[in-house]
Amino acid sequence: MSHGARILFVTRHRAVVGGVETHLRTLLPLLQSRGFSPGLLFEHDATPGQARIDEGLGIPVWSLAALGRQGVLDAVAVWRPARVYQHGVQDLDLEEALLERYPALLFLHAYYGTCISGMKRHAFPRPVPCQRVLGPGCLVHYLPRRCGGRSPLTAVREYHYQQRRLALARRYGTVLVGSRAMREEYLRHGLSESQVVRLTLFGDSLPDAEPPAPRPFSGQVLMVGRLTELKGGVELVRALPRARAALGRELELVVAGDGPELPRMRAEAESRRVLVRFTGWVDRAERERLMRQADLLAVPSVWPEPFGVVGAEAGGVGLPSVAFAVGGIPDWCEPGVSGELAPGEPPTPEGLADAIVRALADADHHARLREGAWRMSRHFSTDTHLDALCALLGAPAR
């Protein structure tokens, strides 16, 4: 296949509403620069004022909501893509129709077909990652372990839906994942060693050209992202008094983001007398400024993050991380090298506090972590990702 080949990207949202769309917004112009011709098929269109994946790119787009399933299939057939690059849609009939018509690759950004709720964690009696293979036992555990909602009918319906998603994933010749943990997840679910390819991910900013210069502690611990129960913000707040007492100095938590857990985090901080500053959502420049000021990035996710690209981005400015050892996080947070990890089964505030102390107790060790985080970030580059992806797009996928 020559460069200039038409690649149809398929995804749920045209608007940049999360990590998948942010990834595609960065990737599409990079592929154009390599000579490919992308098109975009999406289920849900952007609303006025929302940033779009394809903004300013001048590429063909097709809306499932506007054209219907047969309409988009007919329109895409006229365009004649050389390959489909699937990033997960809800309409499985559409996914199957595209898979039957074109050579296709699937990128598994989350737990597609391996968990009824997609969260891959038990919430009761305390949050803990789940290692089960999708099967009837998941239905047994779903309600008592609070894996998702409270409706048994919804659980059964979603179970069968995820069974079909997994069956479709097994039909792709090449399935791409972003971490070792995700690769292991799909091998456990019956995909083959040759089928599942780990593709190194990247952030939306370049690492600094030079390693971080020495600087004194600022006392700031930074958390970035949407504040949901899965992201573990309350556990982080609960960890800080223990870390503060062990270190013998004040720590300020800076939270750049928003979400339904913000009131609980605020109340927890007030009750435990944790110094905290909530900035709300910030743009990329402000996020980078906050990263350059902080001593640590906290990624206290209590579910198995498929990757957690924010850690690689923080490393680019010499900011080490502290996190629970769940999911793909150990790919970029290596204990004693680019950050410190707390046990993830179960994730506890006490374990997280101890990891914070290990990272911040000694200035020389912290300086080594800063340089280690910077060196780590250079492994997660756009060029590394593009070289591997272009090789896959330029060769038969099935």
Image: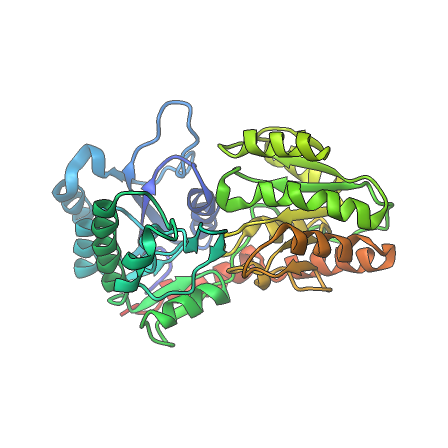
* Picture coordinates of residue 125, whole percent (x, y): 47, 51
Viewer-proximal residue among 87 and 224: 224
* Picture coordinates of residue 392, whole percent (x, y): 39, 66
Give me the residue at 39% from left, 53% from top. Answer: 145
Please say if 144 is above or below 274.
Answer: below
Please say if 50 is above or below 289.
Answer: above
* Picture coordinates of residue 333, whole percent (x, y): 64, 60
Q: Is residue 56 left or right of residue 326?
A: left
Please say if 333 is above or below 146.
Answer: below
Please say if 219 is above or below 164.
Answer: above
Q: Quadrant of residue 241?
A: top right
Q: Residue furthest top?
A: 48
Give me the residue at 60% from left, 31% from top. Answer: 282
Q: Is residue 394 left or right of residue 245?
A: left
Q: Is residue 186 left or right of residue 75?
A: right
Quarter holding the C terminus is bottom left
Quarter holding the N terminus is bottom left
* Picture coordinates of residue 46, whole percent (x, y): 35, 30
Viewer-proximal residue among 268 and 278: 268
